[in-house]
Image: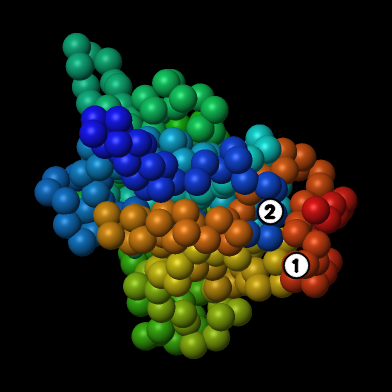
Amino acid sequence: MIRLLAVTWLLATALAAPALAQSLPPNELGRIMILEYHKIDYPEERWTRTPENFRRDLETLYARGYRLLALNDLLDGRITLPAGMTPVVLTFDDSSPGQFRYLERNGTLEIDPKSGVGILESFLRERPDFGRAATFFVLPGASRPNRLFDQPEHEGRKLQYLVRQGYEIGNHTLWHANLGKYEEATVRAQIAEAQVWIQRHVPDYRPRTLALPYGVYPPEVGWALRGTAKGATYRHDAILMVAGGAAPSPFSRAFDPVRLPRIQAIERDLAYWLAHFDRNPDERFVSDGDPAAVTVPGKWRERLRTPLPRTLRIIER
Ligand SMILES: [Zn+2]
């Protein structure tokens, strides 16, 4: 009886265990999750993930074979993950204080270990192979507490730290303007001025991506893609929405950088998508370990985008 129970338990565990990516064949036409975080704070609610839950998300992703990929690398089709791993992109909107906070202790500044950046950094010390990447869609001109993480004396230090560590800064407009409501001059000013204000702190940094406040497009999408206003020229390689599910592979015909979907990193949605890829492992992007090659299932070859984002060798399996 005990033996039977043990066997039943083993079987149940095996069935419940998620498919490990390491055991999956490469498929670089699979989909990629671009996760969207808002507040890292208490209590857990619709737009807030607690520090503990954020940490757990990282652990869950790591254990299931996900590794961090920079958004700009996704756009460039530069997938540098080891074979068998699945990329995941982290994004943080609205520069709220819990995303990145400094604490002063005995006269020295340290990153709050309970803020988003602190949690990421401590996780990376334990698991350096998780990769260091995230994009922060900041609001340089918002009112408190969303103005550049809400520590005015450390604004510059934070943006410089992010860039130095290889994180990305994205445009989210100057103060979260609903771009669907304004005429062209205001839309362009909101975007250009955000860049000017970011570049006050990181002068040579060019934000390559824009996240739409409320997910609302301007009347003409071209206004958000490139232009000149307020003495600045901006050019975005991608526009991110606030929803829409997992993104197509950057090598797929379905990949549209002007309409990049995201998944809101809340308990229910994250669980849904992790389970989705466990049930449908064919849909999951799995790296072949070679940034110079794109490995695709032979039957999917016609799904490849032309031209590809870089000079890449195509391997059918
Ligand atoms: Zn926002």
State which quarter of the image contains the N terminus. top left
Ligand 1 quarter of the rendering: bottom left
Write the residue at 42% across / 54% down.
Answer: 274
Query: Is residue 203 left or right of 97 when viewed as pictured?
Result: right
- Residue at image mark 1: 300
Instruction: Give the quadrant of residue 53.
Output: top left
Three-letter amino acid code at disc 2? Answer: Asn
Image spot of residue 45 (x, y percent): 17, 57
* Label located before the other in sequence (2 or 1): 2
Three-letter amino acid code at disc 1? Answer: Trp
Q: Examine the rendered structure and indicate whether residue 13 appears above or below residue 284.
A: above
- Residue at image mark 2: 27
Q: Nearer the viewer, residue 43 or 197?
A: 43
Distance from Cα at disc 2 to Cα at disc 1: 10 Å
Query: Is residue 74 left or right of 133 when viewed as pictured?
Result: right
Image spot of residue 280 (x, y percent): 52, 61
Q: Residue furthest top?
A: 106
Write the residue at 59% across / 72% down.
Answer: 258
